Image (cartoon, rainbow, N blue to C red):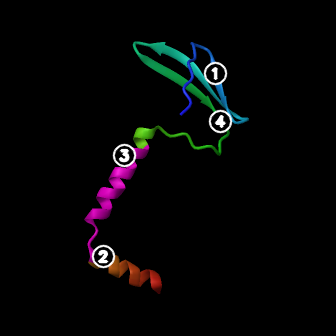
Amino acid sequence: MLVLARKLGESIVVGEDIIIKVISIEKGVVKLGIEAPKDVSIVRNELLEDVKDLNIAASKEVSSESLSLLSKILKK
């Protein structure tokens, strides 16, 4: 992991077309602005973790009978 210190208003460039800029620092919270091409997905890590946890929980609720039925349907 690369660790960089940046002051208010300073930026970091990732690759050729992604810029991360420190927008504000207040009460221990750093706000970042990210400029990137529209085809680059930017998602907070905690949201990805929540979706992963929900998918794991949902998969445990599916019965083996349902999976067998789905498998038969998909083979048709």
Residue type at mark 1? Ser
> Is label 4 in a helix, a strand or a loop?
loop
Whichever of callouts 1 and 4 sits on the residue coming sooner in the sequence is 1
Residue plotted at (54% across, 24% down): 32
Q: Nearer the viewer, residue 34 or 12?
A: 12
Residue type at mark 3? Asp
Residue 40 numbered tag? none
User: For residue 5, what is the image quadrant?
Assistant: top right
Label 2, label 4: how many angstroms apart (C-alpha)? 42 Å
- Residue located beneath label 1 in the image: 11
Mark 1 packing: few (<14 Cα in 10 Å), some, or many (20+)? some
Mark 3 packing: few (<14 Cα in 10 Å), some, or many (20+)? few
Mark 2 packing: few (<14 Cα in 10 Å), some, or many (20+)? few
> Is label 3 in a helix, a strand or a loop?
helix
Q: Is residue 19 magenta?
A: no
Label 3, label 2: how many angstroms apart (C-alpha)? 25 Å
Residue 75 in the image: state x and y as whole percent. Answer: 46, 84
Whichever of callouts 2 and 4 sits on the residue coming sooner in the sequence is 4
- Residue located beneath label 3 in the image: 50
Whether 22 is drawn above or below 41: the answer is above
Point out the frontmost of discs 1 and 4. 1
State if disc 4 and disc 1 touch (CB < 8 Å): no
Q: Is residue 9 left or right of residue 58?
A: right
The segment highlighted magenta reads: 48-64
Residue 55 in the image: state x and y as whole percent. Answer: 36, 56
Whichever of callouts 3 and 2 sits on the residue coming sooner in the sequence is 3
> Is label 1 in a helix, a strand or a loop?
strand
State if disc 3 and disc 4 touch (CB < 8 Å): no
Q: Is residue 60 magenta?
A: yes
- Residue located beneath label 4 in the image: 36
Residue 47 in the image: state x and y as whole percent. Answer: 41, 42
Mark 4 packing: few (<14 Cα in 10 Å), some, or many (20+)? some
